[in-house]
Image (cartoon, helix red, strand yellow):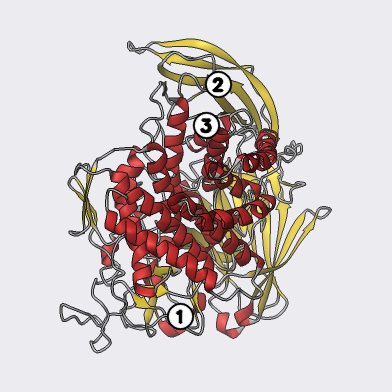
Amino acid sequence: MKESAVRGALAVVAALTLVASVPASPLLAADGALRLNDREYFETRGLSVLVFSSEYDGMFFDEKTAGIELVHHGVRTATGGAVRLKPTPEQWDQIPKLVKRTVDRQAGTIEVTLRYEDFDFDSRVLVKADGRGVRVGVFLDRPLPERLAGRAGLNLEFLPSAYFERTYLCDGRPGILPLHPSGPVKVLPASTQIRQFAGHSTFDDRGRNEYVEAAPFASGKTLVLAPEDPERRVTIESAEGLALLDGRNVAQNGWFVVRTLLPAKATGKVVEWSIRPNTIDGWKRAPVIAFSQAGYHPAQKKRGVVELDADDTPLGSVSVVEVTAQGDAIVRLQAKVEPWGEYLRYRYATFDFSAIERPGLYFLRYGNERTPTFPISPTAYADIWHQTLDVWLPVQMDHMFVKEAYRVWHGAAHMDDARQAPVDHQHFDGFKMGPSTDTRYAPGEHIPGLNVGGWTDAGDDDIRTVSHSATVVYLAETWELFRPQRDETLVDESGRYVDIHHPDGRPDLLQQIEHGALALVAQHRAFGRAIQDIIAPQLHQYTHLGDWSTQTDGLPYDPALRPFESNGRASGTPDDRWAFTERSAGINYVSSAALAAASRALRGYDDALAAECLAAAQKAWADEHTAPVPGAEPPREAMFRQAAEMGSAFQLLLTTKERLYADRFQELVWPALDRVLGFSVAAAVRAMPYFGPEYRDRLAPYVRRYADEVASLQKQNPYGVPITRGGWAGNETVIRWAMTNYHVHKAFPDVLSRESVLDGLTYVLGRHPASNVSFVSGVGTVSKRIAYGQNRADFAFIAGGVVPGVLVLKPDFPENKEDWPFLWGENEYVIDVCAEYILLANAVDDLLR
């Protein structure tokens, strides 16, 4: 699951973090041997071996993007190489802390020191180039702690989807790598379990005091994976023996694991592996032609990007080919290819085919590569947001039975919401409670009225106030600016029933705003303010996949009943979600802003709810302004609070036109523009109608400076958009950047053109690194068909969902897995990004009309 707090406040207030270009790869060895390059990993043509270029995330544990990793013929096929304490570590199992990393260029080695604090246990892992492979040694200065004997081992994890329908040899014995996990496993007493995060457990033992672990399905001293496939063949040898296990037996996001146990009572070099991935002589990664899978409007600029292997050189042109009604393919343009330079680990070139304006169907051809066919049409972007509103958002609706034709997506979930979270508690998803509940409810007490509205977000099941508030704001802004009347969904709030593809005579957008507002206003009814989150209390619930209505029994907890006992009104099973109620001025302001925006949109649709939303928004504002001034705040929290207060002032100004909010907005906006220009400038330009000409004059220099920043992106990467680094990929940043550009362009069209708005959209729709797939499932000719939604265990998608996109793994590898849904930082749909995508799609259609 994703870490909600990672996005949280940072997504609201953080400045854009740009990835600068780096030099291309150095010349590779003519003999194909691995060399340690200047970016501190081993490289030869067709293979990179990374050694703790990234380290494990101490908060969110093993997210499969750290340790020793293999990038094999352009695909990251192995990860997690390290000393681990489980045969197939899960996301919440203990990870080693990286104490030291030493790169010795002269010796051609990388050594890391790893530490498990709980066991006072250190190990050193040394990786050395060895011809076309590497040798990996584990060294212990002190014997293994007795508690870890038979537990600690050297692991390397292989991506199952890279080895589906392939075979293996283990000491010459043949086998087929399983498509679906099929064992073996073993049952162990709970007392032997290595402690998981904060003492939680991913295994629901139903009171049996046991858990399961994967057992080896092959073992020997020489293992060959995919001997029949020269692109995926890897040979591993170890005198100490190797075991091959399937981590999917205990968690759907598990990988195939190769493992050697560390011997007890030994020091020095205790394990050594020889790893020899096969490399194809002269291999080059195929060019990627990046373009918009949804097509183009005739009048817009049409720019593509060609991503090339570091050892490739650009061709002279890209052919733009029209497909006629008779199936003929006619070249309409030879677009000149312009070398761009090096970025990350690849070379890039660009081309412009804006001269093609005639509506029709086209594809692009570069050398032997051909893109899918796409339209050029005045309506190319008119419906690209429909599936997000028609399907994705309804599927996410919590507390509702959701149906689509013959399919039931889920029942009415979490009808037992919610219980007061305990005090002095740190939740595994980042939320916390201090010494007081700050409410009238005792820890564990049921809080009535919270089982209404909201969306599950999205691989998680939580009702997270910050993302819900952002979602409501984006939907309300879409309604205000564009008034889309689309009606394709029946929503019955009182009956808790949703039927997709069933019009009910009411605009779907207003129904979604209502659903989000109900969840937010329920908090103000129950507590008089906003709270952090409503979320599963137990880790084995949090990892739940499938129908959300089966995550809990739907009955409020009654401690007088036995576990799993029910009287039809309550149950003895403490599975109800917890409400984290610690006070936060920033969260209260964020909620206030959303409720103010919702009140404007809901006027004339649900006047009673609109009035309640505005009253709650104004009360939250007033309460925070009469509360004691915070003392010494951490800088990040202070920044979040100030940004949230400005957002609340802005939305209340738009709703009420009152001078109180106008004055406070003016006090906050100028320092905000000085701090984080890209975050604040959209609100600043949208507020212009509420102030005089002197406001515009003061704002103009900021706008010009912002336009200069936008222009500078063309020099930083070939896509001309902000591409971020971090554990969460950057589509959210790109969409927000593009919407900022829309507002700035509308206010200052002579300073910033519309092209940057279009660049942001086409990036999401396919003009990005690593591939040209559309990051919006179901939108465009080729789009994300495997993603991290509630149905990810089925290797499926939800139409209209927007994934995070390209994750830049340190130091230089852009990735978005198209055959493996479980990397949440690349493939998890989330509600606020999807809502802002609806806003951006309508904005682009508005510009091009």
Instruction: Please name the amino acid that badge 2 sits on.
Output: Tyr
In the displayed image of the protein, which residue is found farthest to the right?
106
The residue that mark 2 highlights is 366
Viewer-side label of 3, 1: 1
Q: Is residue 779 visible?
A: yes
Residue drawn at x 30%, y 43% as measured from the top left: 390
Where is residue 722? Give x, y as percent.
61, 42
| 43 is higher (above) or lower (below) than 251 | above
> Which element type, helix, strand or loop, lies under badge 1?
loop
The residue that mark 3 highlights is 758
Determine the CA span between mark 2 and mark 1.
63 Å
Q: Nearer the viewer, residue 67 or 564?
A: 564
| 721 is higher (above) or lower (below) than 442 | above
Res 317 quadrant in image? top right
Label of residue 833 in the image:
none
Determine the CA span between mark 3 and mark 1.
46 Å
Instruction: Tell me whether the residue at label 3 lies in contact with that at label 1, contact meaning CB atoms closer than 8 angstroms.
Output: no
Graded by Cα atoms within 10 Å as few (under 14), some (14 to 19) or many (20 or more), the crowding at tag 1 reads some
- Left or right of residue 196, residue 749 in this image: right
Where is residue 357? Give x, y as percent.
47, 15
Instruction: Please name the amino acid that badge 1 sits on.
Output: Asp
User: Counting residues from the N terminus, which is met first, the one under dot 2 or under dot 1?
Assistant: 2
In the displayed image of the protein, which residue is found farthest to the left?
568
User: Counting residues from the N terminus, which is met first, the one under dot 3 or under dot 2?
Assistant: 2
In the displayed image of the protein, which residue is found farthest to the bottom?
560
The residue that mark 1 highlights is 438
Residue drawn at x 33%, y 37% as measured from the top left: 484
Where is residue 73? Give x, y as percent.
58, 40
> Which element type, helix, strand or loop, lies under badge 2?
strand
Residue drawn at x 30%, y 71% as measured from the top left: 417
Graded by Cα atoms within 10 Å as few (under 14), some (14 to 19) or many (20 or more), the crowding at tag 3 reads many
Q: Nearer the viewer, residue 681 or 447?
A: 681
